[in-house]
Amino acid sequence: MAILNICFILLTALTTGSIDSITNAPMFELISLPYPTDALEPALSQEAIEIHHGKHLKGYVDNLNRLISATPYARMSLTQIVIAADSSIYDSAIFNNAGQLLNHNLYFTQFAPQGSNPPQGILADAIYSRWGSFDNFKREFSKSGSELFGSGWIWLATDHEGTLYIIQEANGGNPVTKGLTPLLGIDVWEHAYYIDYRNRRSDYINALWDIIDWQVVEQRYESSGVVENSCQQAIKALTQND
């Protein structure tokens, strides 16, 4: 699949006579935080945010831009790079940096200084359907994050039907490589929590519940296509009843 993706992009560039568009493609940039660096205290300190965002994430941005420069990957979206590079045994460095960039972009944009109310609407319904209650979901999610061996991520993800999953991913893994849409991701690399929590990963995960912006997570769920699928199913059911 990765080879086919790259060949398609390269062929498109060649047939349109714009091979330069590959070599001169725009580079990825460090995202701006939607809040001041001290806004997430006490869950995450200003020092932790500034180092995590300004040093670690910037490093992934710089590394990825260097690695994909003058390659067919330069014409892909970040998600496309992650999926394509995951399928190639030769592009592990590209996958690692692209995966971490995608992961951190989702991570830093899912927080708000005061968090928000628990999820509502169809996301709440899906959580209750899957785990019985919001508290049960939080308990299972936190447990999965605490028990993940080594460095990685814990994700809440959805399939195209709207079914939710708690996914453990090692290193820079992302559920998109499994055909799922990531909704909520918690970084359990030590660089994410060591400044504030030392080796107390569980305390770090539990503290983040206070700053999650569930409106953002809900928007990601609704944008995954689940609303459209639900509408189609409802229309189909009404048609069958007629």
Image (cartoon, rainbow, N blue to C red):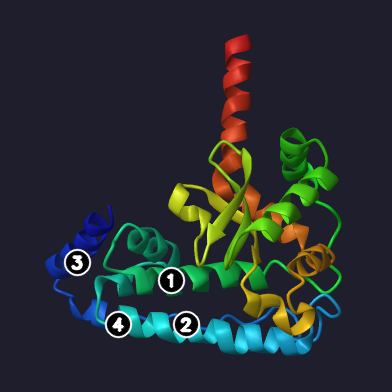
| Disc nearer the start of the sequence (4/3) | 3
The one nearer the camera, 12 or 92, is 92
Determine which quarter of the picture holds residue 19.
bottom left
Comes first in the chain, label 2 or label 3: 3
| Marker disc for residue 96 | 1
Mark 1 and mark 3 residues within 8 Å of each other at the beta carbon = no
Left or right of 210 on screen, residue 66? left
Amino acid tagged 3: Leu
Residue highlighted by disc 2 = 61
Mark 1 and mark 3: span between their CA atoms? 22 Å
Q: What residue appears at the point 80 percent right and 47 percent down from the top-left corner?
A: 120
Determine which residue is flagged by label 3: 10
Which image quarter is the C terminus in? Answer: top right
> Label 4 to label 2, Cα distance in Å?
12 Å
Check the image and report above or below for 180 versus 72.
above
Depth check, mark 2 against mark 1: the one in front is: 1
Real-space Cα distance between discs 4 and 3?
Answer: 14 Å
Please identify the residue farthest to the top as the structure is shown: 242
Q: Is residue 94 above or below residue 205?
A: below
Residue at horizontal 74%, vertical 33%? Answer: 129
